């Protein structure tokens, strides 16, 4: 049995799953000026990273990313507030993560900005 009793769905409008069949794929960076996201691991483990964006049209290259390792063995949820870019990478093959959002799909697509995956973090240097 797994549970996250302190999580409340008050602002969640949708959720979806992402599965990474390998540990090479980096899904980063997706900037969300107005959207809040929550990440919950279903199987395996992921590095989930975030960086506060100073200017969504021309962000500084010197921003400092932070990250946390989420594992299905632990029942925890990471919340990424609006105004950040986020990214993730599986640490185990066939890892799956559930993502909750406070925006519907149309709102999210219209405000998402993508940045190069290697911009603020060296994904290869992250250790468990």
Image (cartoon, helix red, strand yellow):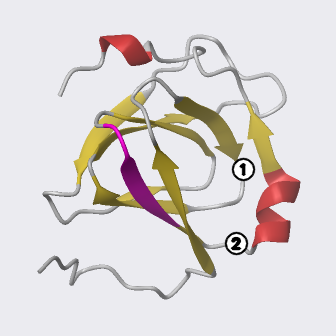
Residue density around tag 1, few if under 14, some if 14–19, many if 20 or more, within 10 Å: some
Q: Is residue 23 above or below residue 113?
A: above
Q: Residue at x 62, y 78 (%)?
A: 14
Q: Which residue is mark 1?
A: 33
User: Measured from the top left, where is residue 94 in percent x and y?
Assistant: 37, 45
Magenta region: which residues? 93-99
Image-based side of 89 in relation to 77, left or right = right
Q: Residue at x 22, y 57 (%)?
A: 72
Query: Magenta stretch mostly in which secondary structure?
Result: strand
101 or 11: nearer the eye? 101
Query: Is 96 included in the stretch rendered in magenta?
Result: yes
Q: Depth check: 94 or 112 in front?
A: 94
Q: Is residue 26 above or below residue 80?
A: above
- First in sequence, mark 2 or 1: give its number: 1
Q: Give the quarter of the image for residue 5.
A: bottom left
For residue 91, above or below residue 73: above
Density class for disc 2 (Cα within 10 Å; few <14, some 14-19, many ≥20) is some
Q: CA distance from mark 2 to mark 1?
A: 12 Å
Which quadrant is home to the N terminus? bottom left
Residue 32: % across, % down:
69, 49
Residue at label 2? 103
Residue 24 image-quadrant placement: top left
Q: Quadrant of residue 45?
A: top left
Disc 2 is placed on an element classified as loop
């Amino acid at each position: 049995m797994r549970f996250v009793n302190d999580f409340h769905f008050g602002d969640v409008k949708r959720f979806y799953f992402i599965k990474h069949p390998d540990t090479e794929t980096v899904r980063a960076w997706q900037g969300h000026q107005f959207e809040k996201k929550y990440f919950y691991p279903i199987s395996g483990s992921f590095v989930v990273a975030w960086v506060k964006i100073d200017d969504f049209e021309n962000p500084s290259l010197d921003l400092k990313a932070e990250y946390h390792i989420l594992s299905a063995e632990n029942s925890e949820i990471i919340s990424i507030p609006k105004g950040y870019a986020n990214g993730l990478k599986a640490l185990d093959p066939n890892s799956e993560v559930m993502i909750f959002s406070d925006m519907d799909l149309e709102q999210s697509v219209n405000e998402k900005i993508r940045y190069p995956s290697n911009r603020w973090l060296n994904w290869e240097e992250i250790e468990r």
